[in-house]
Image (spheres, rainbow, N blue to C red):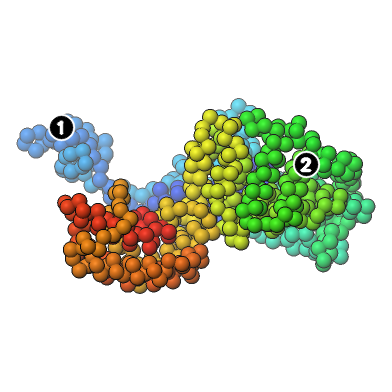
Amino acid sequence: MPTFLLEIGAEELPAGYVEPALAALAAEIGRLLNAARLTCGNVATYGTPRRLAVMAEGLPESQPDVEETVTGPPAKVGFDQGGRPTKAALGFARGQGLDPAELKVIDTPKGPYVGALKKVVGRPAKEALAPGLPEIISRLPFPKTMRWADFDVKFARPVRWLLCLLDDQVVPFTWGPLASGNLTRGHRFHAPEPMVVPHPSAYLDLLRRAEVVADVAARRDLIRGEVARAARDLGGRVYDDPGLINEVTNLVELPVAVAGRFDEHFLKIPDEVVITAMREHQRYFAVVDDAGKLLPAFIAINNTRVRDEVAAARGHERVLRARLADAEFFFNEDRKVGLDQLAQGLREVVFHSKLGASAEKVARLSALAEGMAEQIGLDEAARSRVRRAALLCKADLVSQMVGEFPSLQGVVGGAYARLQGEDEEVASAMAEHYRPAGAGDEIPLSVAGTLLSLADKLDSICGFFAVGIVPSGKADPFALRRQAIAVLRMLREKRDLDLSLPAVVERAVAQVADKGKTTAAYLAAEVSSFFRRRLDRMLVEEGNDPGVVDAVLEAGLDRVAHAVARVQALQKLLGDPEAAPLFVGLKRAFNILKNQDAPQKVDEARFRMKEEKALYDLVEKFGGELRTARLFEIEDITAYILALRDLKGPIDAYFDAVMVMDEDEALRLNRLATMNAVAALFRPLADFSRLTIK
């Protein structure tokens, strides 16, 4: 069965563009094959800075023949009173290549129409694929695209060739100035001449001989092996940096490691600065000893074979020496000033035109962090460290070092704090307070760092909401969604902090409400709703049932960790044959109470049926026994609900025998009060009316 290959050859693509584009290319080819009725086996992608390629194996030679219903004019127009086709029907038959005798009346949503069952002969696979390929290339998503010359197409970088084969046959199409062919190109310097690809099966080997490792995973593994070998030769091991591995993988086509060294006196600069200088400016890998201490050595990945390793290393060393000398200068200048003086400079730094200077933000987050410290019961010494860390946490923003290396904000502050003798918890909190910066980032380890991070992010979210800058669609210029997820992660994972999300939101809102035109109450409600939507999405993406998540969050989002535990417990119990049947009756009880002003007190004297008393007696019994249950952990919640499973029979019997919404107002209100008593046992867990029960 044929194999299909498409390669888009371009000028060097940014490293971050390659793998997302390959994923999109595979998805687009999959959709094209499906639309063209062409099944296939394995679909694989290959990519380097100069090429994006996809290969699909096991295609059929041609599309299968199919029968499809085609319709023409309305039946009243297509056939006369004698049932004979009119000129309109005959024209339709002629256009479709049909015998008029095949025409019949077909019922459609719009009424009866002239139609027929038409056999569509499948086209050869090559012909079926070609028309859709130009659109696929144009549709590939990139953060930025460009035009070149006077062509009417756009791509991340100028496209220089198109290779497209179905076995040994070219799939012909044009895109912009280019026509597809059977030519590819190897390494820009080692094998620059065009090469004929006789068959897709020869593609990878042909490129390998032309000094190109086209398989992204194989190239990544090769780089790992190269840097590990070079680090061993230097007497150490590679500093763990998976992000740099991924970036370098898509910067080269032929990875070759070159090891070098730098002057030891640069090690007096904080390790994080040296590592960042090597990483961000030169894409060099740092080397550490077995204890994790930075060594005066590095590893570079070249994109060409090196004839003279010594000369290559000297070139890299010369460039790095200049970078580290700059870092050393910035470090020395910052040390002359000190963090307290740097913090004074925040008065001149605008955080946002509507939210004031960075010094104002520091004052707000300091007050918010100290308030949370009091809420969780920290002693005065601990609160003092939180205050000190808050005062200095943004000072490095005006340092020369962060001016050169913006990604080191916080890290530089923490390093400078240690060097000037600050308490270790203060320094750690300063270094950690930007965490987590992304989905895979760690949350702060220290309590002070967590409080600062929460305060910083809550202040930003509430501040921007106050001045009307809220995420909409894909627009989120201040990453408020990401910061909200970070807040939720910390409150979820740092269970020992025991912080109420509504309480800290209310405190943060109180400090920024005067910046906007809405009331503090309205603003707090908007921010709380924003957090709920983020948590809802997080939990659904983790595989929880959307109905369970909605039901739990509707019952309240005070302690995030507790809400997550409720979701996980109910998710588990929905599939439990002992608990799930109870939920059917509970859902009915909660639904009855919707939009009803139900009394809180039940009057037993108004019971008319034995089922009323049986249910109420059991509710009272359970209420007394379980009133002190702590519903914080999955195990506690599960045990609580399972202990109440005996309510199922009485609830079902109650609904079979009792009309809750009786015409007699006194009876109706008393029965609603009974429903209220049932719901009260479960209301702290979820709004069961929102559960989706299958």
The amino acid type of the residue labelled 2 equals Ala
| Image position, residue 517 (x, y; %) | 53, 29
Residue 676 in sight in this render:
yes
Residue pointed to by mark 2: 395
Secondary structure category for the residue under label 1: helix
Q: Depth check: give the residue in front, 465 or 121.
A: 465
Q: Depth check: give the residue in front, 671 or 472.
A: 671
The residue at the point 79 percent across, 36 percent down is: 344
| Image position, residue 324 (x, y; %) | 87, 46
Dot 2 surroundings within 10 Å: few (below 14), some, or many (20 or more)? many
The residue at the point 19 percent across, 31 percent down is: 88
The residue at the point 82 percent across, 66 percent down is: 291
Select label 2 or label 1 by which is in front: 2
| Image position, residue 231 (x, y; %) | 82, 62
| Image position, residue 481 (x, y; %) | 56, 45
> Which residue is situated farthest in the front direction here?
605
Which quadrant would residue 261 be assigned to in this image?
Answer: bottom right
Mark sitting earlier along the chain (2/1): 1
Q: Depth check: give the residue in front, 497 or 613.
A: 613
The residue at the point 58 percent across, 58 percent down is: 498
How many circles with numbers are drawn on the protein?
A: 2
Find out whether the residues at labels 2 and 1 contact each other: C-beta distance under 8 Å: no
Image quarter hosting the C terminus: bottom left
**What number is the disc on residue 77?**
1
**What number is the disc on residue 255?**
none
The amino acid type of the residue labelled 1 equals Val
- CA distance for labels 2 and 1: 81 Å
Secondary structure category for the residue under label 2: helix
* Above or below, comparing residue 485 to residue 628 in the picture: above
